[in-house]
Image (cartoon, rainbow, N blue to C red):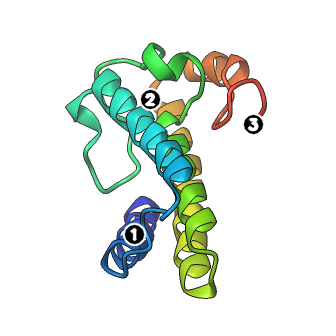
Amino acid sequence: MVGAVAYAMLAVPLAFLVLTKRFFSPLPVVIALQVAGMLLVVWARLTFGMRSFHVGATATQGGLVTTGPYRFVRHPIYAGVLVILAGVLVGHHDIATLIPVACVALALVVRMVAEERAVQRTYAEYASYAQRTKRIIPWVL
């Protein structure tokens, strides 16, 4: 249930940012950063496979994924989204942008915590993986 609420907290503000043309920065260098964030999301999706497309924050069958970008961070998809959102804030630094970006960031944190709890219950080896792999920023956070 928590995962589904967090999913709505992701979808609605992201839709707002796209519809109000705030999603992409007007600055070319920042657009390059956002594209890098999108490439990280795509890499992680390809590595993880199609099994992760669900609203709830549940663990999926098929084994713990620790290859590709998952070697460096436990949540590379969310890390990529945060990179994209950083570009959104640099390009459009007003309250109408800050509020939906903050909602998305909060939703990502809620989903990360919920997903980690579910994965810990499903995969005993997750505790060891979590100790050696940072959550969002390699070697830092």
Name the kind of residue labelled 1 in the image.
Answer: Leu
Residue 89, x across and y down, in percent: 60, 66
Residue 116, x across and y down, in percent: 55, 39
Say if residue 114 shows up in the picture. Answer: no
Q: Report the Cα–Cα distance between label 2 and label 1.
A: 30 Å
Q: Quadrant of residue 3?
A: bottom left
CA neighbours of label 3 inside 10 A, class few (<14), some (14 to 19), many (20+): few
Which-is-in-front pick, marks 2 and 3? 3
- Front-most of residues 122 and 71: 71
Question: Could you tell me which secondary element the residue under label 1 belongs to?
Answer: helix
Residue at figure coordinates x 62%, y 83% from the top left: 94
Which numbered disc flags the more N-terminal residue, 1 or 3?
1
Q: Which residue is mark 1?
A: 14
Work out which residue is located at the far bottom of the displayed protein and give it. Answer: 96
Which numbered disc flags the more N-terminal residue, 2 or 1?
1
Q: Specify the quadrant that holds the C terminus.
A: top right
Residue 91, x across and y down, in percent: 56, 66
Drawn side of residue 51 relative to residue 127, left or right: left
Which-is-in-front pick, marks 2 and 1? 1
Which-is-in-front pick, marks 1 and 3? 1
Q: Which residue is mark 2?
A: 122
Q: Which residue is mark 3?
A: 141
